[in-house]
Amino acid sequence: MVQVKEIETITSFLPQIKIFEALPANIIHELEQLVTRANTYILPGNSILQAPDNEKKGLFFIISGTLRFYKTNSAGKQHTVCILSEGGMFGEVETFSLGTRGTYIETMEDSIVFSIPPEQFEPLLARHSELSLRFLQEVSRRLREQDELVEKLVFRDLRGKVLYFLNRLSIKFGVEENEYRKIDIPLTHQELANMIGATREAVSLTLKELSNEGVLVTSRRRVMIHTEKTLQELA
């Protein structure tokens, strides 16, 4: 059961979510009123929040933890669409689509997710044009990222795809350590293979090659990329 402390955590975190930053106090107050036990998900790691045959409507915000979004083909092979962590937003409503239709959503670690149901979200937008503009900007940004992703997948070889994805993840989840950026989420070879549509064996060989060249430092479920060498190769 959702405890009072979890609800307090969400209300204190809402103003820090990028799309809500610097909003007038009255809008933040309205958002806080939507935080209830019914709208809050407390999930352990490796839990399925959504499956394609059980899609959830509404806007969702990650208060803590990390979620993986993936699709499967007819043979059951997974393809990771994206990974979102604390402060991330996803969902489907009549007005906006943030790319979760037809996907599985799985927690990669213990997570707290807050949702705004469609029947509460639409009136909120109608009352506050500033909020509508921010959501439009977010949808546009997601579309640009998706276009870039498709382009990189089409025109790069496996080595290039691996480096591109690791660099992208390091920018989003990275922690600087000397000349490297450590990707601060657990990541297996299989998960990376799912992201780029390759086999685990091929990805493992590529990671070993990059590690031998000093472009990467790999350990159990952790990857560090050499910032300068990666940028030179991707240029």
Image (cartoon, helix red, strand yellow):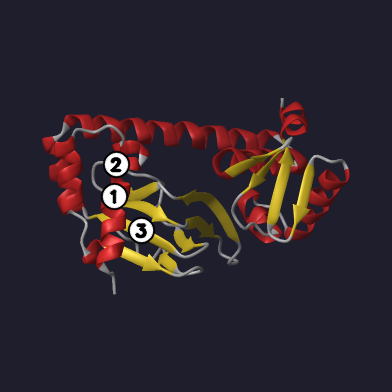
Q: Farthest residue in the bottom direction?
A: 1
Q: Which mark is residue 15?
A: 2
Helix, strand or loop for disc 3 = strand
Disc 2 marks a residue whose amino acid type is Pro
Crowding near the residue tagged with mark 2, few <14, some 14–19, many ≥20 C-alpha atoms within 10 Å: some
Q: Is residue 17 above or below residue 133?
A: below
The N terminus sits in image quarter: bottom left
Residue 20 locus on image (x, y percent): 29, 38
Q: Residue 165's quadrant in the figure?
A: top right
Q: What residue is shown with label 1?
A: 12
Is 83 left or right of 141, judged from the image as shown?
Answer: right
Q: Is residue 88 above or below residue 129?
A: below
Disc 3 marks a residue whose amino acid type is Val
Is 76 left or right of 49, judged from the image as shown?
Answer: right
Q: Residue 23's quadrant in the figure?
A: top left
Q: Nearer the viewer, residue 38 or 126?
A: 38
Which residue does the image show at 66% across and 45% down from the upper left?
Answer: 182
Is 149 left or right of 218, judged from the image as shown?
Answer: left
**Is there any visible trace of residue 31 in the rendered image?**
yes
